[in-house]
Amino acid sequence: MRIRGLLSELGKGAFISSLVGISWVIVFSTNGTSEAYVYCFFIPVVLGARFWGPIGGIVTGIVAGLAAGILMPLSVHPYESQSPSNWLVRLGVMVLAGYLVGRALAQMKERNQEIQRQNQQLQEFGSEVIQALAH
């Protein structure tokens, strides 16, 4: 991988890590996972899937799921920890969402490339037909 590509990937990683951190601060400052703000963690999961496909979605889902799970209380004031079943289910949903978004985007990319290939073939065929009719 070229240096520019490596820096680009590192930049994406730093961006995703920052979004997980920002999500953590938002959720913690709004009294933990008992509020709807916990869904902020899906933003980096979806972007991780967009940047790196299904594997990136899974990895980002694990990181976000741990940040929203074992590292986040159910309630900050008064302090109450989440039950393991609560955060494990959330982690599983984030991992599944990351995989499904990554897979769907990969399939869309493959289909788009196939459409572009077919379009190129059609243009070449059209040019051949025009040339044949011109002679």
Image (cartoon, rainbow, N blue to C red):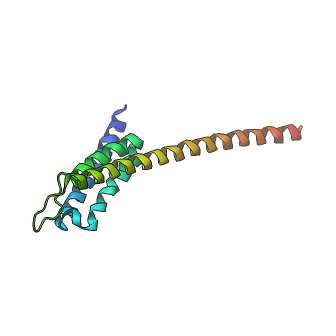
Which sits in the foreground, 81 or 15? 81
Position of the C terminus by quadrant: top right
**Residue 120: % across, % down:** 67, 41
Is residue 34 visible from the viewing direction of this image? yes
Which sits in the foreground, 98 or 131? 98
Picture quadrant of residue 123:
top right
Residue 81 horizontal side relative to residue 57, left or right: left
Picture quadrant of residue 74:
bottom left
**Residue 111: % across, % down:** 58, 44
Residue drawn 19% across the image and 55% down it: 83
**Residue 38: % across, % down:** 27, 61
Q: Which residue lies furthest to the top in this view?
A: 1
Picture quadrant of residue 10:
top left
Position of the N terminus by quadrant: top left
Residue drawn 28% across the image and 67% down it: 36
How many marks do you count on the picture? 0
**Residue 18: % across, % down:** 25, 53
